[in-house]
Image: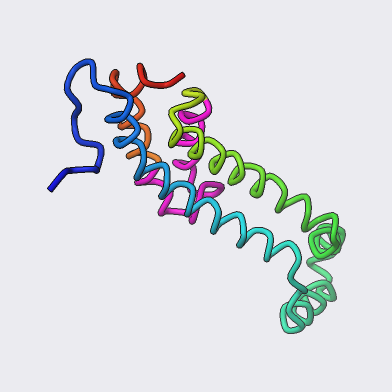
Amino acid sequence: MENNFGSPMSPGGSPAQAREAVSLPAILLMVTSALTFLYGLYGLVSPVNADQMAQLQQAMQDPQMEPMRGFFEFITSTGGRLTFSLPYLILNALIFLGALKMRGLQSYGLAMTSGILALIPCCGPCVCVGLPLGIWALVVLRKPEVRAAFT
């Protein structure tokens, strides 16, 4: 049985071996970033829960929360939700694109960027799932044989 999990390649390995080495980490990065992107879209378009809105209204009535009233109103508005969701969506789309390019052995810089962004828990794919995937992708991408196979 053949090992497809980023095993060491022989010096001067073929592009087929490099494609095989990056394939699984790239696919897993694409899947997790796509799921995270869809979750971000759902959070952007889903209505605010009535219970959450009632709690927010109650908190806004508290005199100690007066300085935060404008912020609460902003984050519940469409513009506020877009402001907080858009960077998250863009980063996960970039991770997906970089993983797609990694799988095709194109754009080494974008593939590295994808692996690095996956390491950031607050904006990477599926929070902590992206950490081991990002490390795995970076380890595979740093192999000289794999780097040489990129166009």
Question: Is residue 133 toward the left or the right of residue 46 in the image?
Answer: left
Q: Residue 136 or 5: which is nearer the viewer?
A: 5
Q: x%, y% of residue 89?
A: 66, 49
Q: Residue at x 61, y 44 (%)?
A: 93
- Viewer-proximal residue, 52 or 41? 41
Is residue 36 found left or right of 78 in the rendered image?
left
Residue 100 x/y as whole percent = 50, 39
Residue drawn at the location 46% of the way across and 19% of the way down: 151
| Residue pictured at 48% horizontal, 30% vertical | 111
Q: Farthest residue in the left direction?
A: 1
Residue drawn 77% across the image and 83% down it: 50
- 113 drawn magenta: yes
What color scheme is it? rainbow
Does 35 appear above or below 96? Answer: below
The secondary structure that dominates the magenta segment is helix
Left or right of residue 63: residue 92 = left
Residue 71: image location, x then y, percent:
82, 57
User: In terms of image quadrants, where is residue 44?
Assistant: bottom right
**Residue 149, magenta (yes or no):** no
Residue 9 coordinates in the image, percent (x, y):
20, 27
Q: How many marks?
A: 0
Region in magenta: 110-133
Q: Nearer the viewer, residue 80 or 72?
A: 80
Compared to residue 136, the image places residue 127 above or below, namely: below
Q: Work out whether 54 lies above or below 60.
A: below
Tell me: 89 left or right of 124.
right
